[in-house]
């Protein structure tokens, strides 16, 4: 059987462990939200993100996305049409088996 003092000791050690974990999480959060440091470490990626955000916010990004969606839709439609034509022609060239 566990005594009260043993339970208190366990709770205190677990509380200290939880506190250490919380401090490590806080340090990580500070590290990931330190934008000047992130920009210094990854300048090209930061420029790319800024340019992409600018495009999307300007409205031009929406136009580019719509054009891309149209092109992908056209390519998909052509691919499906080609598959249907191939299926039809392959069925007509083979003799019917009954």
Image (tube, rainbow, N blue to C red):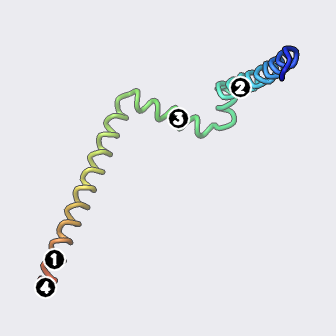
Mark 1: secondary structure: helix
Which numbered tag is attached to residue 25?
2
Residue 16: x and y, percent?
82, 20
Which numbered tag is attached to residue 49?
3
Residue 35: x and y, percent?
64, 26
Q: Do the residues labelled 2 and 3 touch (CB within 8 Å)?
A: no
Residue 96: x and y, percent?
12, 82
| Residue depicted at 26% across the width and 50% down the height | 73
Quarter of the image for residue 11 reads: top right
**Precedes in sequence: disc 4 or disc 2:** 2
Q: In this view, does 25 lie above or below 93?
A: above
* Residue under pointer 4: 95
**Precedes in sequence: disc 1 or disc 2:** 2
Which of 96 and 24 lies nearest the eye of the viewer? 96
Cα distance in 3D space between marks 1 and 4: 8 Å
Mark 2: secondary structure: helix
Cα distance in 3D space between marks 1 and 2: 63 Å
| Residue depicted at 64% across the width and 25% down the height | 33
Mark 3: secondary structure: helix
* Residue under pointer 1: 91
Q: Are marks 4 and 3 in contact (CB under 8 Å)?
A: no
């Amino acid at each position: 059987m566990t005594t009260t003092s043993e339970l208190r000791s366990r709770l205190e050690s677990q509380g200290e462990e939880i506190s250490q974990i919380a401090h490590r999480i806080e340090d990580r959060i500070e590290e990931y939200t330190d934008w000047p440091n992130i920009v210094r470490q990854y300048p090209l990626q930061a420029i790319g993100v800024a340019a992409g955000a600018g495009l999307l916010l300007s409205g031009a990004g929406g136009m580019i996305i719509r054009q891309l969606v149209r092109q992908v839709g056209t390519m998909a439609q052509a691919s499906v049409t080609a598959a249907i034509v191939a299926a039809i022609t392959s069925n007509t060239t083979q003799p019917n088996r009954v």
